[in-house]
Image: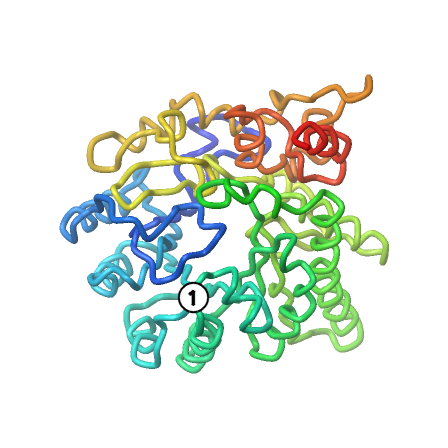
Amino acid sequence: MMKGVEKYGVRIPFTPAGPFEIVWNVTYQCNLRCKHCYENAGQKRPELSTDEAKQVLDKIAKLSGIGLPALSFSGGEPLARKDFFELAAYARKRVGYLSIASNGTLITRDNAKRIKDAGVDYVEISIDGATPGVHDSFRGIPGAFERATDGVKNSLEEGVDTCIATVLHRDNINELNKLIGLSKQLGTMFMHFNYIPTGRAKAHVELDLTPNQRYEVLETIGKEIVGLYMQKKEEEIKWGKSDIKVDKFFSTCPQYASVTKELSQRQGGKFMVEAHYAAKQGVENVANFLGGCGAGRLYCCLEPNGDIKPCVFFQTSKETVLGNMLKDSFEEIWDTNPLLWKLRIREDLEDCSVDGKKVGCGECPDKYICGGCRARAYSYFDGNVKMPDVGCIHNEPLWEKISNSRK
């Protein structure tokens, strides 16, 4: 942290000297055909060889002179890579925290044991419906639901921290409570992923949630984690301690911080949850420090060919590919790339005028704990990352204006 302050000064939100986490889409290969896939996986394209991937991991281990705290293998389906377990074991020796984002269908009992033996700390498995009909329809392959839930059970049996990850959209939003119930039944964490019209989802913009629907989703999930926090607080007052685990319900929506703060205040508490990050009790300055959307600031993305992007949800283009791990200096990109600094500076966020009123993230009092989803702004405003996140409840007039113009 101090190195970030030395390099860039004291900033709100904080910009570290190197990313806290990298999500590496390690392959384009996938055995499913999901409608929303940001990677448009399944098409054969050039990927790094095993030796090249190890070179990347060696570089990651030395980022900014301090290394990388956390690495997440994603895809595509990471387990579809034949050398995945070799790469995972190699990464384990070079990275502090190792995780996998998987569709779960390849996590057999044997593979779950191999995941554990490779030193993977956390497995996130995508389940988009509480029944086979809903999940399999969205994921494109019959039987995906049963194999994914088996993958969850197999990971849990090996003692690996396991999370159910759900992309909510208009066709499955009614599944939310059932999915939360499934995560409780199985004993996993729960992560809601923002639906962003990018990759294959660009052809399904109509599935994007309205701002009101997204708010209701965040409120439903937020009530779960705030409820746990209040129970824990009550037990601590009564008994002096509590074994209740609060960090169980999350969302990648940066607005989650604002919603959980509001829910907590209604019950007389001071508590909020930053998108992706741990629950924070009574310390809003920490939320300002983490700052909601971390694209290109707290984390970044690597493509299967080694290309560097600010976030997995940014459409791949000349503007969003910042360089390549094997050809360019990561530190120089992190320090100087203009797109990254556009994503980091909240004072430059832009507003729009709707019926003579300013609408957007620039004037929002929560811009330092949220900042809006910059990938959504990029998608809806032809590459302008400073524009408003139209998925936010506070920007609903702008959403309606854009929606009406498309009819």
Q: Give the residue number, with chain letter if any, for mark 1.
A: 141
Please tell me which residue is depicted at 43% across the width and 75% down the height of the picture: 147
Relative placement, left or right, of 404 versus 318 is: right
Above or below 29: residue 315: above
Report the residue that reaches farthest toward the left: 51
Relative placement, left or right, of 81 versus 129 is: left
Please tell me which residue is depicted at 70% across the width and 44% down the height of the picture: 210
Expressed as whole percent of the image width and height from the top left, the position of residue 139 reads 47, 61
Above or below 404: residue 46: below
Element type where label 1 sits in the image: loop
Expressed as whole percent of the image width and height from the top left, the position of residue 15 reads 49, 34
Above or below 48: residue 343: above
Expressed as whole percent of the image width and height from the top left, the position of residue 152 reads 46, 74
Expressed as whole percent of the image width and height from the top left, the position of residue 258 reads 72, 45
Please tell me which residue is depicted at 46% across the width and 63% down the height of the picture: 124
Q: How crowded is mark 1: few (under 14 residues within 10 Å), some or many (20 or more)?
A: some
